Image (tube, grey):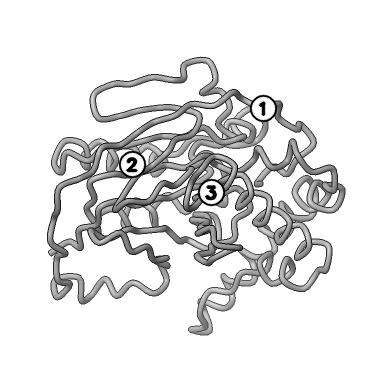
Amino acid sequence: MKTHFKTIVVSDIHLGTKGSKAKEIARFLKQYSCENLILNGDIIDGWQLKKSGSWKRKHTRFFNRMLKMIDQDNTKVFYLRGNHDDFLDQILPLQIGNLSIQADMIYESEGKKYFITHGDIFDSITTNLRWIAYLGDIGYTFLLWLNRQVNYHRRKRGLPYFSLSQYVKGKVKSAVSYIDQYEEELAKMALAKGCDGIICGHIHKAENRDIDGIHYMNSGDWVETMSALAEDHEGNWQLIYYSEIDFQKSADIVELPKTIEPEMKIVAFTKLDQNPGLSDFL
């Protein structure tokens, strides 16, 4: 029996790259059903596909799973533009049945409003990007390669997955400072838009916490963290990590009761200029 949520948010899948965990995200979505599925940017990595990326059958399976959710569960899917899938600028906003493609959105649930955006707009606000650009363009790509080698040997020894880049980000002072500033600026943006919270992605750091009275949430990524945000029918949000799911006991999971879904309000905002010097994975 599937666990049923009102809303699930995923971001930063980076389909078309070696690091994308396409099989894992497809398996994850088989485990759960939801009324609303929000794909919060960088789902397809257009930047890498233009350079050295390649499209695999497993990448197509993700969209097959999404279409099955629309067809079988009547799930509403909202695909929000990220900086790596900025090719969507040519078609958005676009509505086809239960699939909506747009820049960002306002989500209202249980009396609260959330501004949902990929989060790369922050990069047009701050100028303190030298370290993060270096990490993304050179260091992060190398760390992902090294991380695959490390975890190959860890699996052979029966050890759990270890995120090398997350470890580095947590240790380097400038990276910690950038992430803190990022989260604070987006919380201010939610406040300015009259929202109770903000949901984003972009920096590949899952989070669910309060910042000066604003509910800040980040869905993480499907390159390393493999995490998603899920809202139940009482308006409670939680982070779900793929590594913590017990797929063997899926039949014992109790389905949450469905309630009437509140009206979705969608707001598109003026696009901000993108910063071409940013990370290939941020």
Tell me which residue sits at (39%, 44%) in the image: 58
Residue situated in front as seen by the camera: 20 or 80: 80
Q: Earlier in the sequence, mark 1 or mark 3?
A: 3
Marks 2/3 in contact by CB < 8 Å: the verdict is no
Marks 1/3 in contact by CB < 8 Å: the verdict is no
Query: Mark 2 or 1, which is nearer the eye?
Result: 1
Q: Is residue 140 above or below residue 70?
A: below
Q: On residue 244, which mark appears?
A: none
- Count of marks, rendered view: 3
Q: Position of residue 262 (x, y in %)?
A: 23, 43
Tell me which residue sits at (33%, 21%) in the image: 95
Neighbor class of circle 2 (other Cα within 10 Å; few <14, some 14-19, many 20+) is some
Q: Position of residue 108 (x, y in %)?
A: 35, 44
Q: Is residue 240 above or below residue 141?
A: below
The quadrant holding residue 277 is: top right
Q: Is residue 269 above or below residue 107?
A: above
Query: Mark 2 or 3, which is nearer the eye?
Result: 3
The kind of secondary structure element at disc 1 is: loop
The kind of secondary structure element at disc 2 is: helix
The quadrant holding residue 178 is: bottom right
**Type of amino acid under label 3:** Cys
Q: Position of residue 161 (x, y in %)?
A: 53, 74
**Type of amino acid under label 2:** Arg
Q: Earlier in the sequence, mark 2 or mark 3?
A: 2
Residue situated in front as seen by the camera: 158 or 244: 244
For label 2, the residue is 61
For label 3, the residue is 200
For label 1, the residue is 272
The kind of secondary structure element at disc 3 is: strand
